Image: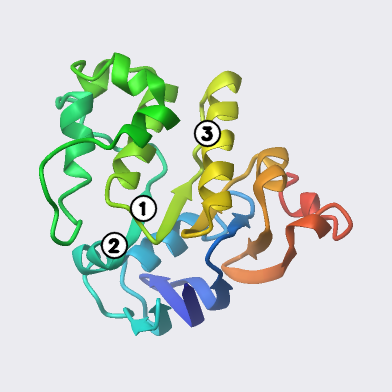
Amino acid sequence: MLTVERLNHYYGGSHSLRDVSFEIPIGACTTLLGRNGMGKSTLLKCLMGVLPTRSGAIRFNGSDITRAAPHVRACLGLAYVPQGREIFARLTVEENLLTGMAARPGKSAQTIPGEIFEMFPVLKDMLHRRGGDLSGGQQQQLAIGRALMMRPKLLMLDEPTEGIQPSIIKDIERVIRALTDRGDMAILLVEQYYDFAKALADHYIVLARGEVAQMGSGAEMDAQNVRRFLAV
């Protein structure tokens, strides 16, 4: 679904991503791990086109999108849930969800599919409340629901468990597993919470100082001592 080849990014004179290469398969959850400041969020922003790349190539579903604008990538089927959620605080839950349809090609009537509420029942209960009035966990569910409104082929999640209560972490884990099992979507999950990442990972990638330090099967994360890359 997604192929990244020798991707390089700079913040001024700082070389933040160094020849990063990997593939993200469809019907699987790939987790991207590493300590703070290793380039994980920068990589997701480069994949979405929010940040420019210096060199390298990004191919999505057979198309070269290396220089494509973010809205073009969204229309092709890339969805991005940023760290910190970034929902529209002054819009209602319903209005936030409907903004997710803007990138859908040939969108029809402005209706919210029932499957969104099946995944996140709390959103239906709070449909007319402003996004800023929701708890952090509820806002995270709203951000994921908004991304799913566009029916993406690739869903990228940047630390969805950050600052979230354990009960909602379990709900998010259940949703990610259900989306993976459906088989028609690729998921790239950035995470520092090792147990959460390990529970969902079909494949894993570790970034260290902007480089791919290790990658492999999710089933081998313990055997490969991946946890050491997260320890302070």
Return the disc, 2 or 3, that comes first in the chain's sequence: 2
Report the side of 201 relative to 11 (left or right): right
Return the disc, 1 or 2, that comes first in the chain's sequence: 2
Mark 1 crowd level (few <14, some 14–19, many ≥20, 10 Å Cα): many
Marking on residue 80:
1
Q: Is residue 81 above or below residue 58?
A: above
- Which element carries disc 2, helix, strand or loop? loop
Q: Alpha carbon of mark 2 to alpha carbon of mark 3: how far?
A: 25 Å
Q: What amino acid does circle 2 point to?
A: Val
Q: What amino acid does circle 3 point to?
A: Ile
Q: Are marks 3 and 1 in contact (CB under 8 Å)?
A: no
Q: Are marks 2 and 3 in contact (CB under 8 Å)?
A: no
Q: Is residue 81 above or below residue 168?
A: below
Rendering coords of residue 130 (x, y %) = 20, 19
Marking on residue 172:
3
Rendering coords of residue 117 (x, y %) = 36, 28
| Residue occupying the point 56% across, 68% down | 210
Q: Is residue 157 above or below residue 86?
A: below
| Residue occupying the point 51% across, 27% down | 163
Which of the 4 image quadrants contains residue 193? top right
- Which element carries disc 1, helix, strand or loop? strand
In the image shown, does 28 or 52 lie closer to the viewer? Answer: 28
| Residue occupying the point 52% across, 61% down | 39
Q: What amino acid does circle 1 point to?
A: Tyr
Rendering coords of residue 146 (x, y %) = 29, 40
| Mark closer to the observer (2, 3) | 3
| Mark closer to the observer (3, 1) | 3
Q: Are marks 1 and 2 in contact (CB under 8 Å)?
A: yes
In the image shown, does 158 or 186 lie closer to the viewer? Answer: 186
The residue beneath circle 2 is 50
In the image shown, does 196 or 181 lie closer to the viewer? Answer: 181
